[in-house]
Amino acid sequence: MIKKISIGFAAVISMFIMQIPVHAQDEDIHNEVFYQVLIDRFNNGDTEIEGELDINDPYHYHGGDFQGIINKLDDLQDIGITTISLSPITENKERGYHGYWINDFYEINPQFGTMEDFERLVSEVHNRDMKIMIDFVFNYAADTSPLTDDADKEDWWLGAPESNDEWLSETVQFDLTNPEAAEYVLDAARYWQEETEVDGFKLHDADMAPQPFVEELTAALKENRPDFYLIGDTSAATIDEAASLMENTSLDLINYPGFNQVLSETFADSDQDVSAIFDAWEEQRLTDFYKQIDGLQQERFTNIFSENQRNAVTAWTLALTYMYTTPGATMVTQGTELPMYGMDAEESQRLVPFNSGDEDLREFHKRIAALHNEFPALRLGDFEYVGSEASMLVFRRSYEDEVMYVAINNGSESAYIDETNLESGMQLTGILEDNLVRENEEGNYRIGIPRESVEVYLLEEDKGFNWLFIGFIISVLLLFVIAVVLLKRKQKQREHADN
């Protein structure tokens, strides 16, 4: 009986907390939280698909498929994912588990399922008010593609690409200045846009194609569907080259590995100067770049900070807070939520070990994602750098009447920063750790948090003690105590009657 009363008490508290309003995700690519999926190495959901499967060979298919993604959609939604970003889905040559050795640009890869399976995946994503994108490879074809053996298409090719990327080792590069080759690629792009209900493309190696063709391709896709998301994935572009692509094409977003490297280096160890992130963001004009701290063709971030003896929950708490509360889209790599380890590309591309993981990290990931989706200021708000002190950073996000502050302490000691530009009579109410900042005798608001921790604050009017809420809690506790006393009294009366 006491257990039932306790559950009832918790339910009452939960009902009170659930009155907090929830805001819908805004329809803008800059507000999205993407989740990068390497289909074959994500999750095996349909064990009847065998084909080329060989889980003992790191360069062969391991069994991930469309059904495996469907099975994990609810979990991904729990950590705030709004858009699934898939590796290429088209038919590949043998051992092309990654999807970049394309044999047929118009056929689905049977290792992942059928076209009907893919359509069901798209439908399941949309049923959850999420979006789905696919990698569209337009620079390369597999060296075994029938296109490369066609004598009438000899002038379509530039030869093997100059790249150290293992995924491009068995490909040939299109000459997209050739009108026929360019039209073929354009037609293939239109096919997948029109035949499926995907919400966008990530254009692989957008910096390796002639810019006039990227302009033509992106313009054509946007003309057909203006709300179609287009992300440029670059491999060797400088910041100026990436900026030129954004300026002269219809791309919505682009990646810039240099900034992501700064993120990784900063949060991989304690006492790193976090202002370096802001400096890089400001200097490189990163308004149309997405943030990604982890990757599939490199050592995992979890491995990097573990070498510095840093705790997984600590490092990812700092990194995820930055990624979910600063302007711009975020790209989360599959397995981050566990977190997933990997010394190199081979290990990083293992099937995601969903039977492992850290529950504390998963819980924090869900909490920071919920804040991102709940408060428009964290997605749409103006960004203002408040200040930094050694390894602590504070910034402000504001949207309409909503103002929030985010504090990130990457240092090994407690630290504080004074906010001197707030009017009197306000308070900063902590949401993650229930911290409270009120005006001090100097008229400042001292934002201080422990070492290697974070806090997100909501700016509110200082109303002193919340006697209404305190009274509510006291009343509920009083009722609980009375119920327990009455229960014990009844038990004693029953025992006395039995005797």
Image (cartoon, rainbow, N blue to C red):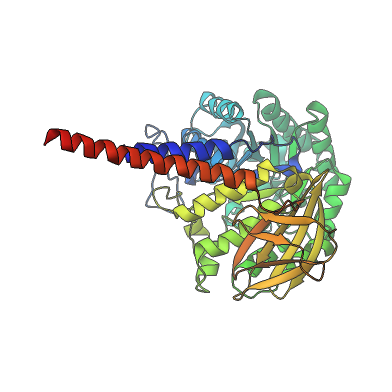
- Measuring 48% from the left and 46% from the top, which residue is drawn there? 41
- Measuring 59% from the left and 72% from the top, which residue is drawn there? 269
Query: Is the residue 492 above or below the residue 407 in the image?
Result: above
Quick check: can you spot residue 14? yes
Left or right of 370, for residue 349: left
Query: Residue 29 appears in which quarter of the rendering?
Result: top right
Quick check: can you spot residue 298? no
- Expressed as whole percent of the image width and height from the top left, the position of residue 124 reads 55, 28
- Measuring 22% from the left and 36% from the top, which residue is drawn there? 493
Query: Is the residue 490 above or below the residue 100 in the image?
Result: above
- Measuring 38% from the left and 46% from the top, which residue is drawn there? 54
Q: Nearer the viewer, residue 109 or 122?
A: 122
- Expressed as whole percent of the image width and height from the top left, the position of residue 174 reads 72, 44
Query: Is the residue 438 above or below the residue 232 in the image?
Result: below
The quarter in which the C terminus is drawn is top left
Q: Residue furthest left?
A: 499
Query: Residue 4 appears in which quarter of the rendering?
Result: top left
- Expressed as whole percent of the image width and height from the top left, the position of residue 150 reads 66, 36
Left or right of 363, for residue 279: right
Query: Is the residue 438 above or below the residue 463 in the image?
Result: below
The quarter in which the N terminus is drawn is top left
- Expressed as whole percent of the image width and height from the top left, the position of residue 108 reads 56, 31
Query: Residue 186 appears in which quarter of the rendering?
Result: top right
Q: Nearer the viewer, residue 41 or 310?
A: 310
